[in-house]
Amino acid sequence: MELRAYWTIILRRIWVVALVVGIVTLYVGYQYYHLRKTPGALKAYSSGITIQIGLQPSSNGDTNSANYVSVSESLADAMVASPILTSHEFDTDISNQIAQDMSMIQQRYGANADLGDWQNASAIGQSLSANRVDSLVTINTNWNTPAGAWAIANAIGEVSVAKIGTYLDYVIKNNAIQNSTGNFMPSQVSARVIVAAPDSITVAGSSSNKINLYILLLLVALALGIALTFLLDYLDDRIRSKNDVTQLLGIPIYAEIPRAPSPGRTQSSASHK
Amino acid sequence: MGNLTKEQYALLTDFDLNTSFGEAFHTLFANIRFNWETYTIEPPYVHTLLLTSVSEHAEQSAVAANLAIVAAQSGYKTILVDADLRTPSLQKRFGLENSVGLSDLLEDISITVQKVSAHLQTTFIPGLQILTSGTSTSTGVTLLLSPKLQACIECIRKVLEQPGNAPGFVIYHSPPVLAGADASLIGALIEQVLLTVVAGHTTRAQAKEAQEKLEQAQAKLVGSIIVNQ
C-alpha cells in the first residue's frame, strides 16, 4: 500500500523526473559526442617508445664527456618540455611516416587495420605525452585503436632517428659547447631508439572511467528527480484523494465525480462508492 | 445536439446512462438517501440539501444540476434553487431565462407558497422545477441576511408538501463557502450540507477553513463530494 502511494506521487509529477533526467541526458550526450570525437577518450590504447637523445661530437670537439652529457640532458629536456610533440611539423611527419609504414602495419594488424584518425596531425599531437630520465625520453601515445597506437609509437621512433636534429637545432645554437681553446664546436644532434625492434612496442588498452561516470550521473539525476517529486508533493497543499478529505475533515465522502466524458460517448462503468 | 454551450453539455442527459460519470451521481443520490432515511420516519418526506463548494470552480453548478436530474428521474419531486445570487448559472444549463426567482421572493413584502409556486420554472426533466436566482439587482448577501430567508426556505419546502405524501427533494446551490457568508447563511437553515472539493485544486487549508465557517454557522455538514477535473 505504501509503495503504491509512493508510485502515485512519482507518476503525478513524472514530468519533474523527465525534466531532470532529460537535461542531464542532454549534457551527457553532448559530452559523449565530444569523447567519441577525441582519440583515446573512450577506449584508450597506450603505447610508448623510448629514445635516447645525444650529441655527436665533431672530430675536433671537446674531449670533456661531461659537457656532452649535460647537453644531451638539455636536449632531452627540450624534447619533453618544448611544444615539439604538439607542433604541426612534427605531427605531420608522424602522419606521413605512418603512410610510409602502411605495409608493415598491415602485416602486423591485417589488411583492414583500424588506425583511427591517423591522418589528422592535431589529433596525433593531442595524443602524445613525454617524460625523460637523463637523456632518455619516453613518448607515450594514447589512441583509440591498438593499431594506431602502435603505428604512431613506431613512427615517432623512425622520425626521431631521422629528423631529431631538425627539431632541436635551436637548442644546439643556444647550448653550443666551447672547447678547451674557447672556440664553439660544431656538433650534430642524434637520437636512437632504445627499443630495437618494432615488436618491443607494447600496446595496452584501458577503458575510460568517464562512461561509468556518466552512467552514475544519469542515476543520480533519476534519484534527484524522484526526490524532487516527493519534495514538491510535500510542499503541495492541494487535496488529491478521498483519504486526504476524510483525514482532514473527518466527514464521509458521498461520491467521487469523474471528469465528464464527451457528450454521447460511452465510458466503461466504474464504481464510485 | 445543436449549438449548446459548454455549461449545457455537463448535464447527465447528454451522456449514456452507464457512464462512470452518470453512475457517480446515482451513487451520490443513494448515499444522500441513506443518510436522510435514518432521520425521517414520518411524512412529509421532503428533504432539503445545500450543495456548496470550498472555492470557485466551474463544475459546481453542474454537480447540483445533475443531482437534481437523478433525484427527479428517481421519482422524487425536486426543486433546484439557484441560491448563487453572485454569478447565477443554473438556468443556462437547462436552457432557461433568468426570470423572477429567489432574490425577487426575498425582496417581496410577504412570501407565500403560492408566490413560490408562481416563480418556479419547469424543465425538460419531468418532476424537476427550478427556482432561478432572480432578477433583483440588490447585493446577494444583503438579501440572504434578511429574516425572510427562513420563511422563503420553508415556503419552498411546503410547495412539495402536497397531498399524497410523495417524497420531495429541495436542492440549494450556493456560492463557495470562502466567497462570502452566503453558503453559511443558507446552510444554517437546511437539513444537510454537502461540501464539494475539487481534487488537485482545493487546498487543505481552504477545505479546513470552509468546514470551520460552516460549523461556526451551525450548518449541518454531513459529507463531501470529490470532483476530479
Image: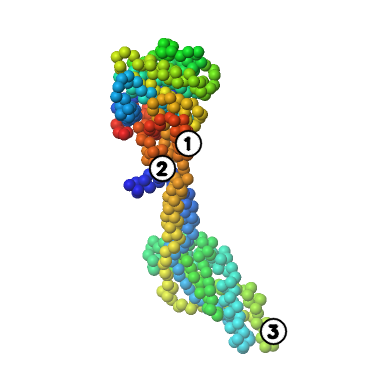
Q: How is the image coloured?
A: rainbow
Foreground tag (3 vs 2): 2
Q: Position of residue B217 (x, y in %)?
A: 46, 30
Instruction: Assign a secondary structure to mark 1.
Output: helix
Mark number, residue B209: 1
Amino acid marked by disc 3 = Asn
- Which chain hosts label 3? A
Front residue of B161/B87: it is B161
Picture quadrant of residue B191: top left
- Which chain hosts label 1? B
B21 sits to left or right of B54 = left
Label pair 3/2, CB-CB below 8 angstroms: no
Neighbour tally class for label 2: few under 14, some 14-19, many 20 plus, Cα within 10 Å: few
Instruction: Assign a secondary structure to mark 3.
Output: loop
Picture quadrant of residue A245: top left
Label pair 2/1, CB-CB below 8 angstroms: no
Q: Position of residue A238 (x, y in %)?
A: 45, 40
- Asked whether the viewer can see residue B59, the reply is no
In the picture, the quarter occupied by the N terminus of chain B is top left
Mark number, residue A183: 3
Amino acid marked by disc 1 = Glu
Identify the residue position indicated by label 2 in the image: A12
> Relative to B149, is A228 above or below?
below
Neighbour tally class for label 1: few under 14, some 14-19, many 20 plus, Cα within 10 Å: some
